Amino acid sequence: MARLKITQTKSYIGSKQNHRDTLRTLGLKKLGDVVVKEDRPEFRGMAQAVRHLVTVEEVD
């Protein structure tokens, strides 16, 4: 199964509270953090919601 590598590239300072909560739910706590998640619709949706703060790469 494919995996997603999600990297926080921008700070959440000044962003909406629900965007901060989404980052925390993904497991991102500070700038530069990287998490690898399964490629599931739930994680893709969360990454899409904060696409201005993260980069997403597909990893095999």
Image (cartoon, rainbow, N blue to C red):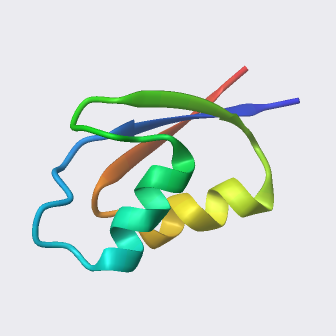
Looking at the picture, does residue 59 appear above or below residue 56? above
Nearer to us in this view, 48 or 33: 33
Image point (35%, 49%), residue name: 54
Quadrant placement of the C terminus:
top right
Q: Residue furthest left?
A: 14
Image point (11%, 71%), residue name: 14
Nearer to us in this view, 42 or 60: 42
Q: Position of residue 4 (x, y in %)?
A: 63, 36
Q: Residue furthest top?
A: 60
Q: Position of residue 15 (x, y in %)?
A: 20, 73
Going by the image, does 52 lie left or right of 51? left
Image point (38%, 45%), residue name: 55
Q: Position of residue 39 (x, y in %)?
A: 76, 43
Looking at the picture, does residue 9 appear above or below residue 48? above
Q: Quadrant of residue 43?
A: bottom right
Q: Position of residue 29 (x, y in %)?
A: 34, 40
Q: Quadrant of residue 42?
A: bottom right
Image point (40%, 77%), residue name: 18
